[in-house]
Amino acid sequence: MRILRPDEFQLDRRIDTENEEQQAAARTIVERVRAEGDKAVLEFTAAFDKAELTADRLRVTAEELQEAYASVDEPFLDAIRSAAANIRAYHEKQLKQSWIDVQPNGTTLGQIVRPLSRVGVYVPGGKAAYPSSVLMNIIPASVAGVKEIVMVTPPATGGTEGIDPYILVAAAEAGVSEVYRVGGAQAIAALAYGTETIPRVDKIVGPGNIYVALAKRLVYGVVDIDSIAGPSEIVVVADEGANAAFIAADLLSQAEHDEMASAVLLTPSRALAEAVQAEVERQLDALPRRAIAAESVRRHGAILLTASLEEAIAISNRLAPEHLELMVADPLAWLGRIENAGAIFLGPYSAESVGDYYAGPNHVLPTNGTARFFSPLGVDTFLKRSSLIAYSREALLEGAERIMTLARREGLEGHARAIQVRLDAERR
């Protein structure tokens, strides 16, 4: 892992991996599913997943969900239930209430908060089987009060209808309403437009490959989406007293995701920088996903030697990382200076993995520098708000002239006359 000065490292990370061919392919898939429904979904599933399905086999039955429990081990079941309880408890604290304010002049203003009616959750399949992501996407929707939570995930390749049983058990534990064996851009299009078998949803969340990301971008506006996720990121800010082995392990925990992941240490301590550099090399040798992690570290990783902790924090705020660890003597003293981060981990025992799997906060986080303006997925993701306005006669008369003045300044006489007609009725 390179030790660099901050001015030797590209601080403005922008990853955009699609090409015109991929864009065209995603557009073709989305348009065909929109026009042809189940027929196109089944054809693309056969072509891409090598699974020959019929429309009546797209939906996973309740019996299949229950049968999945027989294929998972007890330690996993205990872990997934404990994690689910933590995630639910955390997200229940995010719930917002409707409010109404009745004023003395008879004006009533307020905000009505309601859950979305139907939400689609995309869950990757194949090698990328992540039960933890199932919990992180479904439980906040359940806490928000979404009545219908639909999960789509690809069938296993090679002609089988199978779905990873650990994914199905996680979905059942999280409270899913429906599960369909369909993946890729065709699944996103089916959720957005609906087919004969898969009713349309109001919002689509969840990570996927480049075609899934492009399809989500194409259907945005027809439905809402969470975000277009980029490669994973971690920044560690550390002082001279930090544990080099802990830091190296946490950097590699993100680097092993994929070759485009970014792992960066910011420290004013050269001794720590050199110790972490050595630890990364030592730990890489024993990492099962060594090739992926090594390429990530080579292409997008670095140890940046800063002039001070203040400079380290300033650089972190510029990077706006998905995950930020404060490995310093008094992390709470520095917390107030953090402006941009998806999730913040304080102290040596708050490993990023704790947040990914167990603590309760959501691990669906803004990437690619978007923590400057995006927030983690949560209960708010699945809520909508309606404004409430009720004016009394007296309140309207009090504000009428001002309303008409503003409307006429904008050249909207019809707006002004909607007030004037009420004033005229009062004078009759």
Image (cartoon, rainbow, N blue to C red):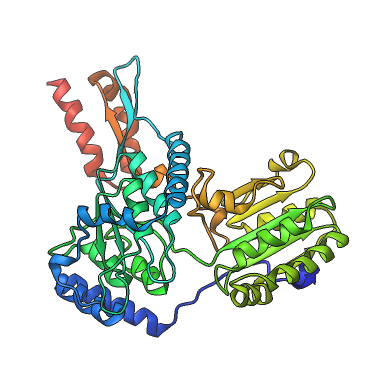
Which residue is depicted at the point 71% across and 49% down? 326
As drawn, is 133 to the left or to the right of 3? left
Query: Residue 249: horizontal and vertical position, in percent?
Result: 68, 60
Figure quadrant of the N terminus: bottom right
Q: How many marks?
A: 0
* 78 sits to left or right of 393: right
The reply to whether residue 410 is in sight is no
- Pick the residue in front: 104 or 123: 123
139 and 262: which is toward the camera: 139
Kindly identify the residue that appears in the image at 66 percent across and 58 percent down.
Answer: 250
Which quadrant, please, contains the C terminus?
top left
The percent position of residue 21, horizontal first and vertical second, equals: 38, 85
Residue 208 is left or right of residue 62, and the answer is right
The part of the image, by quadrant, that contains residue 146 is: top left
Q: Which residue is farthest top?
A: 104
150 in relation to 386, above or below: below
Residue 97 percent coordinates (x, y): 37, 30
Residue that extends furthest to the bottom in the rendered view of this protein: 21
In the rendered image of this protein, does residue 213 appear above or below residue 50? above
Image quadrant in which you'd find residue 292: bottom right
Identified at 42% across, 63% down, the residue is 207
Residue 287 seen by the camera: yes
